[in-house]
Image (cartoon, helix red, strand yellow):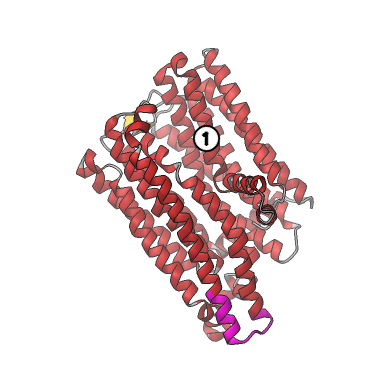
């Protein structure tokens, strides 16, 4: 986050309430902008037009949006992480010319991947042609938003990024509500919602193009660079695909189980499970925003100091002291954020009956809501721990943990469905718990063995037979990798 990260550091160092609140808000947008956009817009639209359009129409409208976001997130995750890494490499080399080409190349590949899969999905579920068209258009738009947002990490115009989401939210709300009042049904509401998403995409794309004005001469150059980058950073791509699929796999299990229900649009969902889990997942957003802020402030400073000590030929005692500070500061902040998250989770667990009553949910969803809230604590630990592994180029370990989380969530969710309603959500909770413990241990050991990893473990000159392989993977000494992280 070379651009927005700089601005977050500047805001946080002003140490005023308004600047800290501003930094936190922008960090939340960077960490979960599309997520926040979807939650707030769907909630407000539902509250406004539920009595007018009816529950069935709202269910069709919501399921189109859910499928669009889920499909686009999983399919574009490998593209996004590879593009982010290539942009980071360009920033490190101080060669900004490829950025526009990379953006267009990532867009083109995303369109080529998402379009046929979304159409096949619509065909499998026999989605009516009108709804299939808007589902495909929305999936493509959201896919490009995921990519654009990753590029915006290199943009210092954090206000412009946040404003793009705010403007899109307003437009989506107005057009969706107008369509509902006009009797346009779920398809008309979805098109209205889509126009707001398009506005977000245009705003984010403009921010990137203004920041990186070097012309993209040929679209083919960007596509070729992305394909070559995918081969070079294939572990990152696999890890991102597994990680995003793991976030959704428990929902897919319930959709395909006996609890799944088919709406008029032909798509299936599990409202008993979905609504409770989506509400529970909200509590992770403050922790993610706080993590982004800590990552770009305290962690960044300690990280630079450690590798700066190495580059300035510090003594082993100085290097070890810097490593100890880096480890202690990072893990201490992770614990503090987690404690705050536990506090929010505890409130949600205790007030679950009141929340269910307030939101007009079913009382049998209380257990699911509580399992989801508890699971979010450990999912945050997993996300934070695996993210830190990438700062030290531990790609294989990153992939192993993401695949393990995917398999755990898949297997335990199937078991929870088989166990009956009392166990709904328990599979997700146990998967997050086990995966987070493994990820935290991996992160702690990485910090403990950082000197070895820096000088030997990630050093291709130690083993001549591996030097060519590491070169092809784009190896650099760890202290050169700060700007190669998203």
Relative horizontal placement of residue 209, taking residue 71 as reference (left or right): right
Relative horizontal placement of residue 132, taking residue 192 as reference (left or right): left
* Residue 35 % position (x, y): 52, 40
- Point 51% across, 31% down: residue: 135
* Residue 404 % position (x, y): 37, 59
The quarter of the picture where residue 179 lies is top right
Q: Quadrant of the N terminus?
A: bottom right
* Residue 383 % position (x, y): 46, 56
Closest to the observer, 476 or 329: 329
Does residue 354 show up magenta in the picture?
no
Residue extending farthest to the left is 419
The quarter of the picture where residue 442 lies is bottom left
Boundaries of the magenta span: 310-324
User: Looking at the image, can residue 99 be seen?
Assistant: yes
Closest to the observer, 436 or 91: 436
Residue at the disc numbered 1: 38
Q: Quadrant of the C terminus?
A: bottom right
Judge whether 462 appears above or below 225 on screen.
Answer: below
- Report helix, strand or loop for mark 1: helix
- Point 37% across, 59% down: residue: 435
User: Looking at the image, can residue 481 be seen?
Assistant: no
């Amino acid at each position: 986050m070379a651009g927005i990260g700089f601005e977050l550091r500047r805001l946080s160092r002003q140490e005023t309430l308004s600047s800290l609140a501003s930094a936190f808000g922008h960090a939340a947008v960077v960490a979960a902008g599309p997520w926040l956009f979807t939650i707030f817009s769907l909630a407000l639209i539902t509250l406004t037009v539920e009595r007018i359009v009816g529950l069935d129409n709202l269910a069709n409208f919501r399921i189109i949006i859910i499928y669009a976001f889920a499909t686009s997130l999983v399919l574009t995750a490998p593209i996004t992480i590879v593009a982010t890494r290539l942009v980071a490499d360009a920033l490190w080399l101080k060669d900004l010319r490829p950025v526009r080409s990379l953006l267009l190349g990532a867009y083109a590949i995303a369109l080529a991947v998402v379009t046929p899969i979304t159409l096949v999905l619509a065909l499998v579920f026999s989605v009516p042609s009108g709804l299939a068209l808007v589902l495909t258009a929305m999936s493509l738009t959201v896919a490009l938003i995921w990519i654009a947002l990753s590029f915006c990490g290199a943009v210092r115009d954090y206000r412009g990024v946040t404003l793009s989401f705010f403007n899109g939210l307003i437009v989506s709300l107005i057009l969706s509500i107008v369509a509902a009042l006009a009797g346009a049904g779920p398809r008309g509401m979805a098109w209205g919602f889509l126009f707001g998403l398009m506005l977000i995409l245009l705003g984010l794309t403009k921010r990137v193009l203004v920041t990186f004005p070097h012309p993209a001469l040929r679209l083919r150059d960007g596509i070729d660079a992305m394909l070559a980058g995918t081969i070079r950073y294939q572990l990152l791509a696999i890890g991102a695909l597994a990680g995003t699929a793991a976030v959704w796999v428990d929902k897919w299990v319930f959709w395909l189980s006996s609890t799944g229900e088919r709406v008029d649009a032909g798509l299936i969902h599990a409202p008993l499970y979905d609504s409770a889990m989506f509400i529970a997942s909200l509590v992770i957003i403050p922790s993610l925003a706080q993590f982004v802020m800590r990552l770009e402030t305290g962690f960044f400073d300690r990280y630079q100091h450690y590798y700066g000590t190495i580059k300035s030929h510090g003594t082993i005692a100085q290097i070890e002291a810097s490593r100890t500070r880096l480890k202690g500061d990072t893990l201490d902040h992770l614990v503090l954020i987690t404690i705050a998250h536990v506090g929010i989770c505890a409130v949600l667990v205790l007030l679950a009956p009141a929340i269910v009553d307030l939101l007009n949910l079913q009382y049998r969803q209380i257990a699911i809501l509580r399992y989801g809230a508890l699971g979010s604590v450990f999912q945050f630990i997993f996300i934070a721990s695996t993210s830190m592994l990438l700062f030290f180029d531990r790609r294989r370990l990153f992939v192993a943990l993401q695949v393990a989380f995917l398999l755990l969530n898949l297997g335990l969710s199937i078991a929870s469905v088989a166990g009956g309603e009392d166990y709904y959500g328990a599979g997700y909770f146990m998967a997050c718990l086990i995966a987070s413990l493994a990820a935290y241990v991996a992160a702690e050991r990485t910090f403990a063995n950082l000197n070895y990893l820096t000088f030997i473990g990630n050093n291709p000159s130690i083993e001549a037979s591996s030097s060519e392989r590491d070169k092809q993977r784009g190896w650099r000494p760890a202290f050169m990798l700060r700007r190669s992280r998203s």
